[in-house]
Each structure stands twice: as structure tokens, then as C-alpha cells.
Image (cartoon, rainbow, N blue to C red):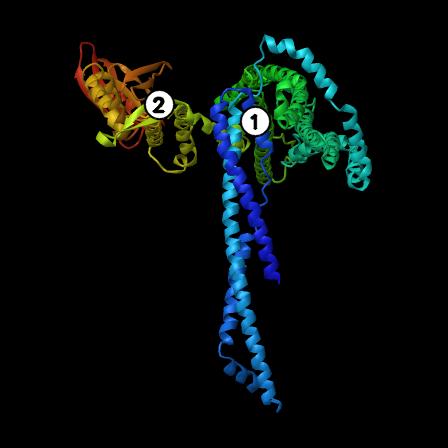
Amino acid sequence: LRATDRLNELTRMNLQTKQQLDSLSQSDQALEEQISVLQGSLLLSRILYKQQQALPTLKIDSNLPDQIADLRLYQFELNQQRENINNPSVYVDKLLAAQTTEDNSQALRTDLLAIIDTRRELIDRLNRELNALLNESITLQLNQKQLKNTADSLRATLDEQMFWIPSNKPLDLEWFKSVPRLLERQIAELPWGANLRQLGAGLTERPLLFLPLLLLIVVLLWRRGYLYRKLAGLHQDIGHFKRDSQLHTPMAIMLNVLLALPGTLFLALCGFALQMDARGQNANLGEALFQMAQAWLVFYTLYRILADGGVAELHFRWGRSQVAFLHKQVRRLGLVVIALVAVVTIAKHQPAGLGDDVIGLTVVLSCYALMVWLLHKLLLTGPAREHASAFRMLIGIALSLLPLALIVAVGFGYYYTALKLSDRLINTLYLLVIWLIIEATFVRGLGVAARRLAYQRAMSKRQAQSSKEGGEGTDIVIEEPTLDIEQVNQQSLRLIRLALLGTFIAGLYWVWADLISVFTYLDNIALYEYSSGTGDAATLVPISLSDVLGALIIIGITVALGRNLPGLLEVLVLSRLKLAQGSAYATTTLLSYAIVGIGFVITLSTLGVSWDKLQWLVAALSVGLGFGLQEIFANFISGLIILFERPVRIGDVVTIGNLSGTVSKIRIRATTITDFDRKEIIVPNKTFVTDQLINWSLNDTITRVIVKIGVAYETDLPLARKLMMQAAEENPRVLREPAPLLFFLSISASTFDYELRFHVRELGDR
């Protein structure tokens, strides 16, 4: 009976799934016809919005695979039972043989055989029913999978088309003339009173549901003074070498979060009440209040962190002027974001009415304009520009230009597209704020650890000195040591920043991932075609706008890897290996060349420039190099020889002609030598390979110094020789092995000429 009921249920679900599948297939076919007929018309956007809202809510049975597996197992068990009673007489004899009583009569045997026959019949019927149930389950699973794929494809097509088509008329003179009429109608249709009444009803009709949140808000407001006192106590411990700890900063941030919770919980409570009611616009308004609560939590917490004498100033050691500037601008930006997120959340759920939305359009454009101004001041000017890395400046430029691009998009009628991007822009701002706070917290934690380690070393040193002095000097006041974290723990700090950067990039991908699919629309915009293959197999392959954007992204990744990956490899790997001087530099230089070369080849292949076309260009360049660019090419090859053969390395002291100095850089064309007057001399690489080169520190830094001394004729020569050798032997920079030597060379017009020859270990000793 249970199998029959389940079979009927699966049959009904199968019919429903097939109906939905047929409906979605027809909608998919009709969508392609509508797009081809109504392309460029505002009517198409309204039709797409209605189709998106009419998409069914799929109820996929996630337990179906497990149920199919259970059915197969149950069928196996039934087959085992059927095998056991396949021979009824033998089975009954085994049952009767197991009985110890003497009532093994023929009547009992007959009854048992009848029961076994009935059981075999029931097992066969159940097995047939289970076969039908299994087939229906597998059919339903396939239909549901096909339905999900069709629905996902249709939803992706709708999202893609809605993103790339105008949702309303451009903001031209005709639109501005219609603004008074549209505004009057929109104000008349806004249900202000009804929404407030429904909000009040939602709160009063379910007091047991909302009362705990209200009590939590009251408790947080009541204990607000305690939170401020606790926060002040944590601030007082900062910098004290005994009471300060790495947990002080996370605890202070958590207290600031608790100070922001009352407003957040109140907005979330109102949004929950409206969503529980779910009449009219209440669901959209409830979600808008939820988004406002999230914005309040992020920006009010940041506002408290940047307060005068707060976490940013005392814990992170940011400058007072910088904190005051950020505190003022963050308050303005927070208000703008709260207003923008409310309008965006409501408007994007009503795509059909975007063409008549004057109030929302005005608020959105105003917020975009204010965000351009505020983000530019926050990220690109003032204190934020000082000591900012190239990646942070790139993020700042992108975030500052995006609202400006959204203003242009709204002006051309892409209001819905701007709303979708606004949501991602706001989430990116949240992510950026969290990233900066976490990074500053880690930097502060490393500083505390380094200071604590230095204090322990100072205490150990003091105890050692006290023990030597027999206990004297115990009243000496130890000054707290201050160490620069960039010098003491530079590698740990770089690793932490690298990990946080990777997490931030992953978060950016998570924020923008659902919009990546809409950019497949760019595949339809073909820019040019190139021929692939030869003869009859030749085909024309189009290069779309997405391919060009992909090539630009590859160039950006190549530049980023070429600049940062060799240095990262040197910090993480090469610095831990016992390499010869200059080997790490040669490895990282060659790696940067390889990265640039691979990126160049991949970029060309993305743009359709294959090797069979590129080889003619390479041949032409080879001829050109042989004639016009032979010097540059010779310098390039010489640079590779220098890196591999290493006749000179970074840090070597060399002499070429009349130039002497220390090798500071080895580039692809030339090598930079810093002479002893701190001047940088650019020497072509060919000179190091073809000309005579003196490397004072290639294999050994020990060199010989020759001092020529002229002694007058009337001098006491034995005493002079003794003094010259004594001067050499008593000098601590002169090596004892090889021993100093003194030679008498010649007799000049007025002197006896001697040479004192000795060896020194370092070039600076000369």
C-alpha cells in the first residue's frame, strides 16, 4: 500500500514536472522570437521583466537519489527472501525440524505451505510494484534535472538580456518635460499610511516573536554607558608593555559593533515584521530595511572606530588629522549608502515600473554624484594617498569611477543595469572596509608581539647584568623598547598582507560572480574574423568583444605577476635557500622575463594571432634585428649571458675602462653601476661580455695593495725597512697570510724606491 501511494505521488509529480518543462520550453522558444523581433524596443524590457517574475519556483526533490538507492537495496532484500522460499517443501521441512515439540502434524505442514505460497505471491506483486516505482523515480529524476537545466538557461538568458537592454527612455528633454506628471502620479500611488499601519500590525500581532529583539535593543541601550567605560579601559592599556595584548584590538572592535547593534536590530526588526506580513509592497520594503540594517552596522562601526581617541588613532596608530578627515567623510558616505541601498533594493524588485520611477531615479542619481565626490576624497586624495600601494590606488580609481559610469548608464536608459551594479558596488565597499580593518588589526598584533619579545630580551639582559654585578642596580628603571615592525617582522607582515589580499580578491569574485554570466552577451558582438586551418579545412573564427576584454585582463594579470611574483618567490623560497650572491636576482629576473613572454603569447592567441601567422612576423623581426637593431639585440643576448654565466652579479665591485663602482641592477639591455660618488652609470650589457672587465669580488674579495715609498739617500735604510714592515704587520686590516712583503726595486735620482705589498680581506680595507 505504501509503494502504491508513493507511485501515485511520483506519477503526479512527474505530470507536474512535464507540464512545467513544456511551459518553460515554449517560453524559451518564444523568448528567442521576441528578442529577434523587438530588439531595441522598450516593450521588450517590459516583456522580459514579466517573464522573469513568472518563472516558476522549482521544488526539486533532493532526497530522490537516496530513495532510488533505498529502493534498489530493498529489491535486493526481497529477491533474497524470494530465493529462500523458492522451494516451499524444503523451506517448511527446515522450519519444522527446528521445532522441539511433537505437534509437527500434517495440518501444520499444509498451513505453512499455504502461507509460503501467499508470501511468494505477495513478494512478486511487491517486486512488480517496486519496479514501477523505481522506473517512475528515475523518470522523475531525469525530468527534474532537465527542468532545472532549462529553467537555469532561461533565467540566465533573461538576466543577460535585461542587463544589456535599456529599461526606460533616455533622460532627454522629453523625459524632463514629463517629470511633473509622473511625479504627481507616483506620489499619489505611494501607500505611506498603509505601510505604517501594516508595520504596526505586524509588530503588535506577534508580540512573542518580536519581544526578545525589543528586549535585546533595550538592554544594549541601557548598558551603553558600560560599553563606553569598557572601551575606555581598553584604550588606556594600549602601549603599556604589561597590560597591552593582541586581544585588545579585536575586543575594542567588538565593543564598537555592540554600540552599533541597537540601530541595526531596530531596522532589522521592522524589516522582519514587514516580511512576515508580506502584503503588497511589504516584502520589498522589509528587504530594504534589512539592507539598511546591514549598511548601518558596517558604517556606524567604522564611524566609531574612527572616532577621536578611538581604535584607529590609539590601536592602529593612524595620524590624528587622517582619522579626523576619515571620520567626517565616512559619516557622509554612510548616510549616502543607506539612502542608496534602500532605493536600489525596492526598485530592482519592480523592474516593470522603472520607466515611471521619478523619485527613485532622482535619489539614485543624487547618491551616485555624492559617492563620486566622497569616494574620490576618501580613496584618492588627502591622507589616503600617502604610502598607498598601486593595487590600492587601482581599487580606489575603480570604485570612484564606477558611480560616474552608473550615472552615464542611467542617462542612456539603463536604469535596471545601474541598479544591479549598485548592489555589487555597495557590497564591494563593505568588503573593502572589512579588509582594511582586519589588515590594520594584524599589523597592530605583529607590533605588540615584536614589542613584547624585545621587552623580554631586555629583561633577560638586565637579569644577566644584575647577576654579574652581584645584585647591584636593581632599582634601574627599564625603558620600554620600541621596535619598528616593518624591520623586525617584515616577512611575516608581507605574508599576512598577501593572504589578506588573496582573501579580498576571492571576496570580490564572490560579490561579482553572479553577474559574470551576463557578460557572455559580449560573445555575440563580433569585431573581426581570422582564418583557422588551411585548404578545405579552413574556417573563419570570430573574435568577439569578450575576447578583447579577456586579452586586456590577461595583460593586467601578466603585469601584476611580472612585478610581484618574482619578489614573492624571493621572499618565500629563495631567501631560505643557500644560494650564491646574485643567484636569487638572476632567478627572479629570468622568471619575470618568462612571465612576460608567456603572457604575450597567450594574449596574441586570444586575439587570434596564432603561431603560423606569427612566424612570419618573427622572421621579419629577425632580419630587422640582423641589420638595424643588432646592437640592441646584442645587448639583450649579453644580458642573458650575464645572468647565466654570472661574470658580474648584484653587489660586485667592477672596473670597466676608467669606470669603477658597485653593480646595482642588471636589466634586459643595460646594467647599472653605482660609483663611489653615488652616481649611477648605465653600461650596455655588450660591454661586460666583449670588453676587458675587472671584477674585484667575483670569487674572492681578498686583494693586494701596493704602496710605493721613496727613501732619501741619507736615510738609515735598516731602520726604514723595519718601520715599513712594522707599519704593515701592526695594522689590523692587513692579513697575516699571505704575509706582507717589502721589495727594493730601483735607485732614482734622489731616492731609493721601495714597494710594500700586502693583502686585505675586504675592498673597503684598501
Q: Which mark is residue 47?
A: 1
Position in image of residue 225 (x %, y %): 79, 30
Label 1 Cα crowd, 10 Å radius (few <14 / some 14-19 / many 20+): some
Q: Amino acid at mark 2?
A: Gly
Residue assigned mark 2: 764
Position in image of residue 690 (x %, y %): 20, 21
Tell me if I can see residue 342 in this picture: yes
Residue drawn where x is 49% and y is 48% of the image: 142
Position in image of residue 451 (x %, y %): 59, 33
Q: Going by the image, does 706 lie left or right of 136?
A: left
Residue drawn where x is 76% and y is 24% of the image: 192
Q: Earlier in the sequence, mark 1 or mark 2?
A: 1
Foreground disc of the pair 1, 2? 1
Q: Secondary structure at mark 2?
A: helix
Q: Amino acid at mark 1?
A: Ile
CA distance separating discs 1 and 2: 82 Å
